[in-house]
Amino acid sequence: MEKIVIEGSQKLSGEVRISGAKNAAVAILPATILAGSACTIKNLPMVKDVTYLRDMLIQMGGKIHIHDNDKITIDTSGISTSKIDLELAKRMRASYYFLGALLSRFKKAEVPFPGGCNIGVRPIDLHIKGLEALGAKIKISHGLIRAAADELRGARIYLDVVSVGATINIMLAACMAKGTTTIENAAKEPYIVDTANFLNALGACIKGAGTDVIKIKGVKSLGGCEHSVIPDQMEAGTYMIAAASTKGDVLIKDIIPTHLDAVSAKLREMGAEVTEYEDSIRVKAPTRLKAVNIKTMPYPGFPTDMQQPMSVLLSVSEGTSIVTESIFESRFKYFDELRRMGAKIKIEGRVAVIEGITKLTGAPIYATDLRAGAAMVVAGLTAEGKTTISNIGYIERGYERLEEKLINLGSKIRRIEDK
Ligand code: EPZ
């Protein structure tokens, strides 16, 4: 395992191009199974979660042709199994999308309980409830989820909790079900819209993605398509926050600015200059910013995935901030690492009180999950002196060419062997 070393306090400046959205890509790759023919996917981020899914598709009999770094063609016509590689699947959360995708195409699926970041209990009861409503029989034993259906039939499904994963899994399973499926209280994240657009390009009939009611009229069969993955708003948000916390000036390019409204609004409230262009955002923060309160909410609220990098910025802002994490109950573990760097944070259940200090100081720290890893990078860039981050495998799961992008923005970051 390698480590990332950062010599901090360098102002970030210049331009950075944002990659395709990991959380859209990890839904679209399993969704290619529905096509049963060739799909060309562009703007695919080459992060670890994407390569695991690509390898799973190959193991199942899929044929992959890599055109460019971020463009691949996947032909799933040769896939005849309804099982996925257990070892690869356990490493990540998104392997649960094979449940909906395989069930849709083969009327049966066998997948392990998903892995992924340890940020809370993360049940999948809503996925199961949705698939059962469509007519699937589900059995869980020995860590495996087995689903089977003679026929999938459209149904009206109300999600008790807004869930990205359950919304997408139900959409996948409903595309070729008989009749119409309605998902109420659906998640509205841009990943949902991108996955629905991909499925519609295959020939599905999905309406309302991006609102809280999605209607899916089942069709008999689907075919291939060409699709470009939307830009990653979490990668973009991370660079916006890093620009602000290093008192820098960065143009974040090739994004959809409205996807970042919640982050932009908070940065403006703190005193940063945030200028939106058609497909880019410039963040400039010449002076120390002011404390604000944040509460994480499903999209379009403030994203839980940005709670961690944002808390680093709040820890060096002027005044006291209150951060409420309402999506995942264990997403504060990284505060122990931040305290090592001098941050003053008190935690009371799902609420953190952050008393801003003037500077963080570099220290050896540990990435406790993917976005916590990104937060550690922001902390290292912001701190005075040297920060060494270990357990960086998490960061590689979601950030493409991180060091290269940050070096281009003027930071002193490198990778070393962990001895
Ligand atoms: C997705 O996770 C993302 N992962 C997460 O990204 C993101 O943090 C999260 O959505 C929230 O935006 C992927 O897209 C692969 P949820 P997911 O189902 O789908 C509860 C990252 O760093 N719930 O929307 O697993 C759940 O406990 C990450 O990129 C149920 O109760 O999240 C949580 O409180 C990590 N039952 C809430 O819903 C269920 O069956 C939202 O979770 C499902 C979820």
Image: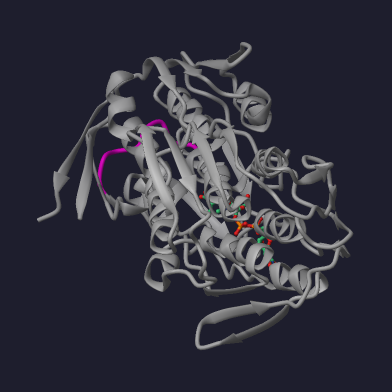
Q: Position of residue 250 (x, y in %)?
A: 44, 16
- Is 199 magenta? The answer is no
Seen at 55% across and 55% down, the residue is 30
Seen at 66% across and 40% down, the residue is 302
Q: Position of residue 211 (x, y in %)?
A: 83, 42
- Is 363 magenta? The answer is yes
Q: Main secondary structure of the magenta part?
A: loop
Q: Quadrant of the N terminus?
A: bottom left
Q: Is residue 313 above or below residue 163?
A: above
Q: Is residue 89 above or below residue 282?
A: below
Please identify the quarter of the rendering in which residue 276 is found: top right
Seen at 57% across and 47% down, the residue is 28
Nearer to the camera, 214 or 281: 214
| Residue 251 visible in this rendered orientation of the protein | yes
Q: Which residues are magenta?
A: 356-364
Seen at 81% across and 45% down, the residue is 205
| Residue 334 visible in this rendered orientation of the protein | no
Q: Position of residue 187 (x, y in %)?
A: 75, 50
Q: Is residue 258 above or below residue 295?
A: above
